[in-house]
Image (spheres, rainbow, N blue to C red):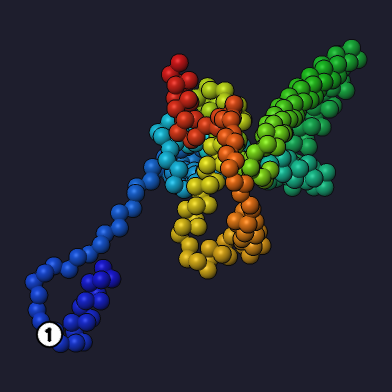
Amino acid sequence: METTETIESVESSEPVAQETTEPVAQSEIVTPKLREAKIEVEGRQMAINESQLKALWGLPENEELTDKEFKSLVSAYKAQKTADSRSQQASRQEKLVKEIAEMIQTNPWELLQRAGYDPRQLAEEYLTQAIEEEMLPENERELRKIRAEKEELERQYKEELTRKEQQQIKQAVVQAQQEITSQIIDSLENSNLPKSPDVVKRIANYMYLAEQRGVNVPIKQIIPLVEQDLRNLNASILKSLDPNNRINYIGEDLLKQIRQDDLARLKRPESKGTSVPQTKPSQNKKLTKEEFRQILAERVKS
């Protein structure tokens, strides 16, 4: 559209020296269509697309996902949003309970009016019930008292049991996250990757995808995949930048270190007449991303 407007403006402002019947070529930019999924969380409809899922899980934008991987990420996103929604509901309920408790202590009559009750009528009913209980025989009053205490003890026991169960579940989740993070950090000792939160998150994402397929993959086999992902990501960024921005992206200090390493390598003397010993292939061959996906697919089929 911009090309057409430019041509029309030139034609209207300057005389045309020679007419031509050749059509004007217009370039069309085809944008790939992103997959989108709709989910329902606590009765509320939500939509999420492939690009948003990749950003959420720390995956590269150019990463190609299979349909199964896309569905797994959608399911994980739905579970996360459901947990967040329930947590917010519980927080609101807790706040409401505290407000009601404070109002009971400061102005219970106003609370009853807001709830739609007549405080006077309730007071009269309470006094009537108290008088009737005082007129009961002593043994029947004691029996009612014992029953009320029993019901209160049962209620407190159930609340305490529920609270302990929730606390145990929360502690188990936190402990599992800490153990996985510790295992990942230990596995990074002999790798070229830093022990940064982004690297740990990427490794955890691969572990999650493998677990969704029922495949148990060692962390040491996942590390090469993350290395390749970061290498591809940095390479694509550097290729897209002009020389000045490329230097800014790398940083002056790191660029200086790279130059010094190159000079040291060029100045290193080479011994004549000696052959360079060939290094033995590593026993633990690092898997590429394609090999990892092939292993996942074969194990899932089996």
Residue at image location 14% in from the left, 84% down from the top = 16
Residue 270 located left or right of residue 291? right
* Rendered location of residue 250, percent (x, y): 59, 60
Q: Quadrant of residue 63?
A: top left
Residue 242 located left or right of residue 153? left
Where disc 1 sits, the SS reads: loop
Q: Check the image and name the residue furthest to the right.
A: 138
* Rendered location of residue 281, percent (x, y): 56, 30
Q: Which part of the image, by quadrant, shows the C terminus? A: top left
**Amino acid type, callout 1:** Ala
Q: Residues within 10 Å of mark 1 (few under 14, many from 20)?
A: few
Q: Quadrant of residue 116?
A: top right
* Rendered location of residue 117, percent (x, y): 68, 40
Res. 177 visible in picture: no
Q: Which part of the image, by quadrant, shows the N terminus? A: bottom left
Residue 132 or residue 107, whichever sits in front: 107
Res. 299 visible in picture: yes
Residue at image location 41% in from the left, 34% down from the top = 66
Residue at image location 50% in from the left, 52% down from the top = 235
Q: In this rendering, is residue 263 above or below 147?
A: below
Residue at image location 30% in from the left, 54% down from the top = 30
Residue 79 or residue 232, whichever sits in front: 232
Tally the numbered discs.
1
Residue 123 located left or right of residue 272? right
Residue 156 or residue 76, whichever sits in front: 76
Q: Check the image and name the residue furthest to the top.
A: 139
Residue identifier under label 1: 17
